[in-house]
Image: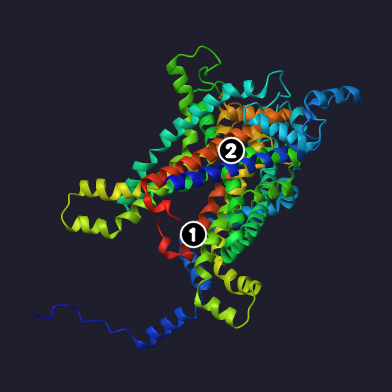
Amino acid sequence: MRQFIIRRVIQSAVLLFVVMSLSFLLINLAPGGPEVLLTQNPRLTKEQIANIRESYGLNKPLYEQYFTWMRRTFTLDFGKAYSSPLPVWDVIGGRVGPTMQLGFFSYLIGMLGIPIGIFAAKHRGKLGDNVVRVLTVLGSCMPVWWLSLMLIIILANTIKWFPQGERTLIPGPGQDQAPFFGWFLHLMIPAALLSTGVLIAFTRFVRAETIEVLSQDYVRTANAKGLEEKKVNRWHVLRNSLIPIVTLLGYLLPALLSGAIITEQIFNWPGMGRLFIQAATSRDMPILLAILLLTTFLSILGTLLADIGYGLVDPRVRYN
Amino acid sequence: MSQTSAPIKTPIVSDVVAARRKSASQGFFASSFSRFFRDKLSVAALIIFAIIGLTTLLAPWIASNILKQDRDTIDFNLLTQGLQPPVAPGVGGHILGTDELGRDLAVRVLYGGQVSLSVGFLTAFISLTIGTTLGLMAGYFGGKIDDAVNGLLQIINNIPSLFLLIILSLIWKPEVLSLSIIIGVISWTGTTRLVRGAVLSLRSRDYIDAARVSGANNTRILLVHILPNVASLMLVQAGFDVVGAMLGESALSFLGFGIAVPVPSWGNMLSDSQLYFTSAPWMVYFPAFSIFVTVLCVYLVADGLRDAFDPRLKGK
């Protein structure tokens, strides 16, 4: 087991390193270079531009910038933002929490897919199963932003929630002194919408997995020897069909973070996704780079933890 | 022993033989497609999709001959009649109304479909080409090549795709072609996984050994003996790729990093309509409905194909 963990940690570290280098290269590929925001003012003289480039360290050769950047990134020092006088970390720092909250509650709501999947598997081919299957197909054709938009429109036009142009029900964290209940309600609608992807993935996965396990010999044996159905389900079916869920939790993280960009943008949630959109619009490259790295780091960490978790619960995985 | 059961109907020998001959003469693809066409839902989805595809393809002709409107022309007649755009469906000769500038919504929805569908199919083509090539090589050669492909796959899978797409769209000006390339380049991993898995099980089959013994080189084995056997996988995957690409494009355009105005796409039309939620909800409904129906049809066709190619999967 220890060997397995060490191997996976090393793999993840290499992966992170490669992604970091590629992202750095990518940002420097952008037309006008990374400094386009700083030097776009046509009234700047050549001298002033040279000064700006020097103060951000952009005049040095690319490989030197790369090494400085790499060294500083490991201490969470992402340099200065272009669009604000603050260091990048001060701009991003406050945004990580809200995104985490959103993601956490989305996972929590998405977990409902587990009982739904089991229910569908046990009523395979019957009405309940068919309803679940139709809903999952419809759900996978409705992206999060589409669903959010429709919900807002319907609520705005019927019960007059969301006053025109406003998409904030109640002030969120940092926007005002929000009471706990207000914060909770403000969080729950975007979280519920963001969770649809996770919910569908869980439902499908658990359903397929449970059907698979139900047809195994050991389940038939347990039934044949006269074990109560409740006990068969608990000890033989659930235990085996829920093992792979551990990995699913990790693998869904990148998609969840992608969805968070749109949900945060639509619902004015002050997280990393909304900051990313703002930074992309103003071409604030250091912030873009930092958020890309942070979310990728979270994804890699999620996958790593999922793999280790899988190795812990299912010994077969460790040896390959 | 009582003789209560009905007399057993003896099958007519010639019928059985004919049926057997028919099933034997049908190849894998023919029998799969006939299975696909027996599924009513899939066929209905295919027909609706064909209609959508045809109308968007004929958008210029429909616009000038039936709707008599232009994509980007602002209807100033509305202003002289004292109407403030956006006008509601049916007003001033605009079947679906107009947008906030007074451009005909029906025509823009049609042209938006052109963008969505072209991005969808171009992307599917690109990601399928990359995905299949890498999957074939990784599965067939194994070893270092497999490791390299796997590494590439890990990198792409671990970067949240929308973040990467937005950065890429800042670097290359998003048009239909560049957007398709951008989305295609980061969405091939699913195909590679599937193809690689299939090739792994195919390459140790006897017929591959037989081909090698009779002097076929790797290229020939891959293209003539293995590729046709993963073609059904590719076809199904292509459908889901189209779905993914259309959703990706609309999300990017919705956020303002995709197709740029004045070229309409369903995503950027929805983005523009956000300010008119309550005053002009039709600006939201039509593009939103178009996206949903089109994506659903492609999804159902792909799903139907998957079931048809692998009947064991039915209901999974």
For this orientation, the residue located farthest to the bottom is B14
Q: Could you tell me if the residues under marks 1 and 2 are in contact, i.e. CB atoms within 8 Å? A: no
Q: Which residue is labeled 2 in the image?
A: A296
Could you tell me residue A178's position as x and y percent? 49, 14
Q: Which class describes the residues within 10 Å of circle 1: few (<14), some (14-19), or many (20+)?
A: many
Q: Which mark is residue B247?
A: none
Above or below residue A195? Residue B58 is below
**What's the amino acid at mark 1?**
Gly
Q: Quadrant of the N terminus of chain B?
A: bottom left
Front-lying residue, B249 or B144: B144
- Quarter of image, res B250: top right
The residue under label 1 is: B304
Quarter of the picture holding the C terminus of chain B: bottom left
Within the image, what quadrant is residue B149 found in? bottom right
Q: Is residue A122 visible?
A: yes
Q: Which residue sits at x=47%, y=36%?
A: A195
Within 10 Å of disc 2 (Cα), the crowding (few <14, some 14-19, many 20+) is many
Q: Is residue A200 visible?
A: no
Where is residue A121 shown, x and y percent of the image? 33, 51
The subunit letter for the residue under badge 2 reads A
Relative to B291, A251 lies left or right:
left
Residue in the foreground of this view, choosing between B131 and B281: B131
Extreme residue toward the left, this view: B1
Q: Residue at x 61, y 74 (%)?
A: B221
Q: Decide: is A92 above or below B194.
A: above
Residue A34: image location, x then y, percent: 77, 33
Relative placement, left or right, of A140 versus B282 is: left
The local secondary structure at tag 1 comes to helix
The answer for which chain carries disc 1 is B
- Circle 2: residue type: Thr
Q: Nearer the viewer, residue A196 or B134?
A: B134
Distance of mark 1 from mark 2, alpha carbons?
35 Å
